[in-house]
Image (tube, rainbow, N blue to C red):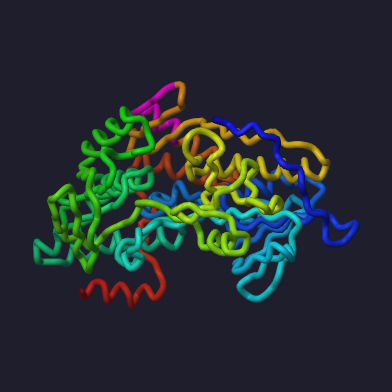
Amino acid sequence: MVDTAPVKSETSAPATPGQPHRVVIVGGGFGGLYAAQSLGRAPVEVTLIDRRNFHLFQPLLYQVATGGLSPGDIASPLRSVLSSQKNTQVLLGEVRGIDPDEQMLKLKDGETVPYDSLILATGSAHHYFGNDHWEAIAPSIKTIEDALEVRRRIFLAFEKAELEPDPEIRKALQTFVVVGAGPTGVEMAGAIADLAYETLKDDFRNVDTHDTRIILVEGMDRVLPPFDPSLSKRAAKDLEKLGVEIRTGTFVTGLEGEKVTIKTGDHVETISSHSVFWAAGVRASSLGKVLSEKTGAPCDRAGRIMVEADFSVPNHPNIFVIGDLAHYAHQGDKPLPGVAPVAMQGGKYVARTICDRLKNKTTPPFVYSDSGSLAIIGRNSAVVDLNWTKLTGYPAWVIWALVHVMFLIEFDNKVLVMTQWMWNFFTRNQGARLITGRDQIKSDQAFMKQ
């Protein structure tokens, strides 16, 4: 149920009389960017700090990882996005410390940034459940660098298979394991299947890409656990139709070299695979721990800050936490999910709260408006739950595409993505199939000699 208690109106006065109220936002993701944009005409001084100079549309990262889109198609320079806001400054930096008493942030380079109101929106990272050493073997897809590394591994696996005379090694090279069957894992598995069975089918001479094996591992009893069971069932059916092997009720118990050990009940199986990708579980960014230590704010098991009904930190009404870093349990019987719409709405709400406080007004309680959930399975296949209706197949695929294009930040990104999707749809030629990376020639040669 919704918390209907009045929202607190406390605010901190500017450090210097006559100086505009200083709002510092850490993180240029959905939550931070929407908060900054909502404050564009407010009588405040806004500073947005991010360790990257761009906003990244993470829901489409898997398409960068499979060669469907280029990184620039889904990224927007923060300075460009906010250039028209004369009250807003963008800083490239990484926050390492917080002093809530002095109302000061400390950056990695030693610089300090004062604030009157602070909004933390630093997102999350994938959780390896105490096995962080697995990250080198099974990368996740949270950043552009992650996506490019996954892309490199996928296409190098096919390149090496083309040269490999040993059928067992070739089989391992053409075996891909995706761990986690939430939206990211399902979309990744479907994209690899489409890539292997359609896009690359005529590109190689010694490799039959139809021999590719894609295994989707999920610990719960169905794919897309947050979705309605009927949609999970349809998604599983569509994935299997694409050629994806689904292992539900299954856990990864070991990753070593090119060996993946999984356990289903009492049955243990070892799979030979050169390409394992992680999409299971998330944990809050490290800044959550820093904030908790400095303010005494409680955290949940994933490291998210347990916030008040207005997203503020307990006993620190001028510090707000939104997006994936926040554990918001004031609406319904469980915390709000870590999805983009929650971050967007949270960013807008906190911006409004700050403006209302400056006017000594009371802000109505936050109410998350859930427009539904959606996930793409493959070409012409998706599942969409709009709360008032559920769609599958081609209609769902069209809605999925329109929604994702709509939420891209810049107009040129919308045009680029729509154009690229149309080209890919009619030609099945995903043109961003580049093998790149640091020290690429050296690393590629080493990989090919393995």
Q: Quadrant of residue 422?
A: top left
Question: Which residue is rendered at x = 62% and y = 64% of the image?
Answer: 294
Q: How many marks?
A: 0
Question: Which residue is rendered at x = 44% and y = 55% of the image?
Answer: 283
Which of these two is toward me, 270 or 191? 270
Which of these two is toward me, 263 or 45? 263
> Quick check: 432 above or below 92?
above
Question: Which residue is rendered at x = 44% and y = 54% of the image?
Answer: 301
Left or right: 450 in relation to 361: left
Dominant secondary structure of the residues highlighted in magenta in the image: helix
Q: Is residue 70 visible?
A: no
Residue 284 image position (x, y, % from top left)? 49, 56
Question: Which residue is rendered at x = 55% and y = 43% of the image?
Answer: 328
Left or right: 189 in relation to 415: left
Q: Quadrant of residue 52?
A: bottom right
The N terminus lies in which quarter of the figure?
Answer: top right
Identity of the residue furthest to the top in this view? 388
> Quick check: 449 above or below 240?
below
Is residue 393 in the magenta section?
yes
Residue 233 image position (x, y, % from top left)? 27, 31
Q: Is residue 307 visible?
A: yes
> Quick check: 53 above or below 341?
below
Magenta residue span: 389-400
Residue 447 image position (x, y, % from top left)? 26, 72
Is residue 433 in the magenta section?
no
Which of these two is toward me, 314 or 253? 314
The C terminus lies in which quarter of the figure?
Answer: bottom left
Left or right: 65 in relation to 34: left
